[in-house]
Image (cartoon, grey):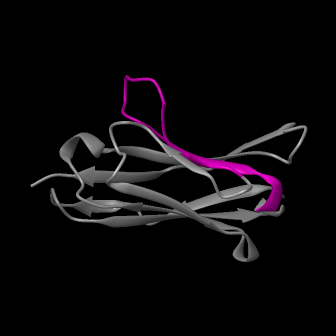
């Protein structure tokens, strides 16, 4: 069974950090582009960070310089390190995998992990 399992969400104060993890089950991440999205109730899902199969990363302007995405394909795991968190980062964060290269015919989603930033 193919799954993406996120973990690491929680409640933190502004300025603190969290690291989200996304573990792929049932497939190997090596030829997949992995994305982190977030969604606030009532709003559209927003792409936060992405990392290509080659390891090239890109970020939304709202998180660039504060968030870092990384991958360890030998562990089928992708991380999202979130630093200097702000209340506006509060959302449910979802992991998404597109692949495998070059056809990218698969599109998998995790169940989401909730992040709350509040004093």
9 up-or-down from 37: above or below = below
Residue 59: within the magenta? no
97 up-or-down from 83: above or below = above
Give the x, y percent position of residue 101. Answer: 86, 46
Q: Residue at x 41, y 67 (%)?
A: 19
Q: Which is more toward the observer, 10 or 104?
A: 104
Residue 50: within the magenta? yes
Give the x, y percent position of residue 87. Answer: 19, 45
83 up-or-down from 38: above or below = below
Q: Residue at x 22, y 52 (%)?
A: 117
6 up-or-down from 98: above or below = below
Give the x, y percent position of residue 78. Answer: 60, 63
As drawn, is 22 to the left or to the right of 98?
left
As drawn, is 59 to the left or to the right of 116?
right
As drawn, is 79 to the left or to the right of 9?
right
Q: How many dots with numbers?
A: 0
Q: Residue at x 37, y 30 (%)?
A: 41
Q: What quarter of the picture does the N terminus occupy?
A: bottom right
Q: Which residues are magenta?
A: 30-52
């Amino acid at each position: 069974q193919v799954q993406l399992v996120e973990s690491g969400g929680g409640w933190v104060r502004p300025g603190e950090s969290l690291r989200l993890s996304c573990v792929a089950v049932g497939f190997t991440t090596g030829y997949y582009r992995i994305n982190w999205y977030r969604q606030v109730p009532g709003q559209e899902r927003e792409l936060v960070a992405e990392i290509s199969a080659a390891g090239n990363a890109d970020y939304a302007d709202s998180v660039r310089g504060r968030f870092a995405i990384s991958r360890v394909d030998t562990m089928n795991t992708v991380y999202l390190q979130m630093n200097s968190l702000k209340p506006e980062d509060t959302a449910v964060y979802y992991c998404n995998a597109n692949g495998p290269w070059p056809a990218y015919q698969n599109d998998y989603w995790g169940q989401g992990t909730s992040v709350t930033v509040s004093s």
